[in-house]
Amino acid sequence: MRSCRKVRRGSGCSSQPRTPSNRSIAPLPLSRASASAVGSSPPDTRANARREAIARLREAGIESAVLDADLLLAYVLGIRKEDVYAHPEPVLSADERAGYEGLIARRARGEPVAYLRGWKEFYGLEFAVDPRVLIPRPETELLVDETVRRLAPLDSPLICDLGTGSGAIAIALAVALPRARLIATDSSTAALEVARANASRHEVRERIDFRAGDLLAPIHETLDAVVANLPYLTSAEVDAGGGTSIEFEPRAALDAGADGLAVIRLAIAQLLARPAPTDIALFECGPAQARSAAAELGAAPGVRTDIVADLAGRPRVVVAMRVAARR
Ligand SMILES: C[S@@+](CC[C@H](N)C(=O)[O-])C[C@H]1O[C@@H](n2cnc3c(N)ncnc32)[C@H](O)[C@@H]1O
């Protein structure tokens, strides 16, 4: 299981909550603040603001209304979520009220909390995220766990992370495997900007070489391992994703064609065409794609495959050992 989690918040290791003070939050009309000034509404306490926000999010059909209202209030106030409950009485300033209303309005329209706050925790680390990159998902931690477990005995493995997005996987691996060197590729130069900044924040920038390009195309080195969480939704699933976070995430990070395998299949073909074998390759897949991906890899001579299930028992990570060129 995860052995080397370390929460690093913001730039450096401070445990202070992030505040939005240096961010631009579009002010909304101060309806309640103005109303309470003339004494016609309950006071603008944290508790009241929170209650109103929960009601508004529920009305908009947001299932995680309570959690989201709390996270966003804590974010606006620059405090920990627990302190929202511990100290519900303080009255919000007009700016805090406006900032909170603005974020709740955006959340009610479906924008993910991670984009609203500008960060997401993954593998115990904090990653800056914005609409240039996919928001790292908790299920991808299994891919990192499996990679760390299998590569920990190696001295200084060279690992490639395909489709790095925010850099979450490459950076988590660099932190967990301090002697590893990494190459991380993405076809999106905008995503690579985010990933480079995240690597600098976590002080692993000098061990990760970020390269723009199509999957393995920019890599000529012999690799010890390839890891990838590439797009694996079908185009139809992406089209049907309105009202969820995927409506706000880059389509190129999600859409893998009619069967959800288009990008993984391309990566497998590139891997099998490389002149030197790769010791191990690990692909995160959707449960509907895992068996097909394993069969494609296992069809190559001498390649052994395994499928690791996630906590819900669904096939999730396809592992292939000794991936050598097709004959
Ligand atoms: C599902 S996202 C995963 C991002 C990150 N690895 C993570 O787990 O949070 C897939 C990423 O692959 C990138 N991508 C899609 N097709 C690609 C291709 N042909 N070559 C390189 N990167 C690609 C996308 O731009 C996106 O950043």
Image: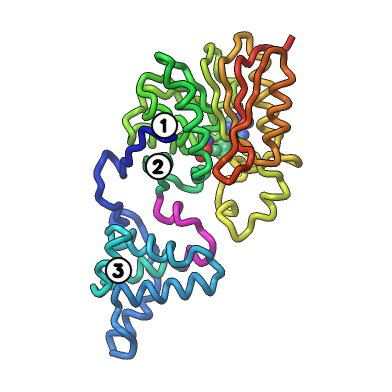
Q: Amino acid at mark 2?
A: Phe
Q: Amino acid at mark 3?
A: Asp
Near-viewer residue (62 or 40): 62
Q: Please report contact status of discs 3 and 2: CB closer than 8 Å, yes or no.
A: no
Residue beneath label 3, please? 95
Local crowd size for mark 2, using a 10 Å CA cut-off: few (<14), some (14–19), many (≥20) = many
Q: CA distance from mark 3 to mark 2?
A: 26 Å
The image's mark for residue 127 is 2
- Determine which quarter of the picture holds residue 294: top right
Please state, as top left, top right, bottom left or bottom right, where the C terminus lies in the image. Answer: top right
Q: Amino acid at mark 1?
A: Ile
Give the dominant element type of the magenta stretch: helix, strand or loop.
helix
Residue 34 place in picture, x, y as percent: 32, 82
Q: Please report contact status of discs 2 and 1: CB closer than 8 Å, yes or no.
A: yes
Local SS, label 1: helix
Q: Nearer the viewer, mark 1 or mark 3?
A: 1
Local SS, label 3: helix
Q: Is-magenta flag for residue 97? A: no
Counting residues from the N terminus, which is met first, the one under dot 3 or under dot 2? 3
Query: Vertical placement of 148 versus 237: above or below?
Result: above
Name the residue rendered at 76%, 41% in the picture: 258
